Image (cartoon, grey):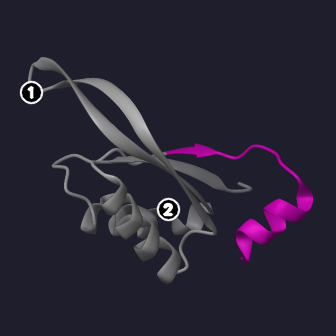
Amino acid sequence: MKGLVIFSMASSRKEAERIKNALLKKRCAACVNIIKDAKSFFWWKGKIDSAKETLLIVKTTGRNFKKCARLIRENHSYEVPEIIALPIVDGDTAYLKWLKNP
């Protein structure tokens, strides 16, 4: 596997910054993007709900997924935070090399 992209929604910009700082400080992510003002719609406890959230896009490697997931949970306010990963199936060779050793 060349790498992973992890998506996680945070309740606020402040929470997203806290998660980003934890991921980068522990060097389990090579890069984290924060995108504010996302509107999410979802099922929660039997009802359709919505929230204004902040999206984190985390670039990392497969070997760092569990560490990233743990740090996201530790710094997250949600009972069930979104932590999903998609494989990077291809990309620029130089970028993928950097991703593994930022």
Quadrant assignment, res 42? top left
Q: Nearer the viewer, mark 2 or mark 1?
A: 1
Residue furthest out toward the right: 93
From the viewer's side, name the closer residue of 17 and 80: 17
Pointer 2 with pointer 1, Cβ within 8 A: no
Q: Does 58 sit above or below residue 97?
A: above
- The residue beneath circle 2 is 65
User: Could you tell me which secondary element the residue under label 2 belongs to?
Assistant: helix
Residue at the (80%, 61%) spot, across then down:
96
In the rendered image, the quadrant that contains the N terminus is bottom right
Amino acid carrying label 1: it is: Lys
Which span is picked out in magenta? 85-102
Residue 26 in the image: x percent, y percent? 48, 82
Residue 24 in the image: x percent, y percent? 52, 75
- The residue beneath circle 1 is 45
Residue at the (30%, 51%) spot, across then down:
12
Q: How far apart are the alpha carbons under marks 2 and 1?
A: 28 Å
